[in-house]
Amino acid sequence: MVLSSTVRHSEPVWRPGLRFDGRMNPASARSTASPYVRHPREIAAAVTLPVAAAAAVAPGPAMPQQAGRAAVATACAALVTRMALIRFIASAAGAEPAEIEPFDPFHDATPTALHGIGAAPDRQRLRVAGARCVDVWHWWRQHGSLPDDRVGVAGAVALGAWCSWALGSLAQAEVRAQYAIDTVATDALAGLVQRSCRAGRQPTWWG
């Protein structure tokens, strides 16, 4: 069986003419083409996507460096980049980080991997990525960070919950999803994983 519902992609994406400057007010950025306020979180997530992908699947038992945690949290702050990471992590061919492709919510279909459909991914790759994502949450719990970081932290542990679900570990997935919801109650991916676990729905790729 598959995940019980779809995730809506309502977050803004980068558009031509949108200029990002690290010196900007961290709460907003403005387009050179219009006065409307844009959200730089999605821009930062897209920029860090390849680095986050590398940190998520790098060999070894632990997150490579603190920079890896920061990259994963930044990339996971946007739902569209999490869709790209799901597609990357679940790649049966074991795609390399440099090969990760951005996800376009307006043109790309929802990744079938989100629902546990398609060729079976590498189990170890799922375990490593899930552990790395949850490591972001544990580090945040121990050391604290800026309030704005909560979105990325919740996104990371929600992705870790999906990794557990993708492995068929529903109990672990539900616990991780709750961590994400406790951090940001409205996290869409965490809610999706939690509902699927409670309904007993599992990915189809393990037979």
Image (tube, helix red, strand yellow):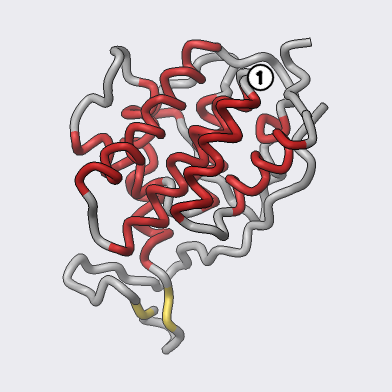
- What is the count of numbered marks? 1
- As drawn, the residue found furthest toward the bottom would be 35
Residue lying farthest to the right in this orientation: 1
- In this picture, is 143 found above or below 64? below
Pick the quarter of the image with the C terminus.
Answer: top right
Residue 203 position within the rendered picture, expressed as x and y whole percent measured from the top left: 73, 23
Q: Quadrant of residue 29?
A: bottom left
Drawn side of residue 4 relative to residue 71, left or right: right
* Residue ID at (43%, 75%): 38
Note whether 74 is above or below 20 in the view shown.
above
Mark 1: amino acid:
Gly
Q: Which residue is mark 1?
A: 168
Horizontal and vertical percent for residue 133?
40, 34
Above or below for 165 versus 154: above
User: Which quadrant of the view contains residue 64?
Assistant: top left
Q: Label 1: state its secondary structure.
A: loop
Question: Where in the figure is residue 51, as x and y percent of width and height?
Answer: 31, 36
Pointer 1: residues within 10 angstroms few (<14), some, or many (20+)?
Answer: many
Q: Quadrant of residue 129?
A: top left
State left or right for residue 35 relative to residue 113: left
Given residues 191 and 23, the one toward you in this image is 191
Which residue is at the front of the view, 21 or 139? 139
Q: What residue is at 32 percent from the left and 74 percent from the top?
A: 27
Q: Quadrant of the N terminus?
A: top right
Residue 135 lies, with reference to residue 183, above or below; the image says above
User: Residue at image x 29%, y 13%?
Assistant: 60
Image coordinates for residue 28, horizontal then vertical, percent? 34, 76
Of the pair 3 and 53, the residue shown nearer to us: 3
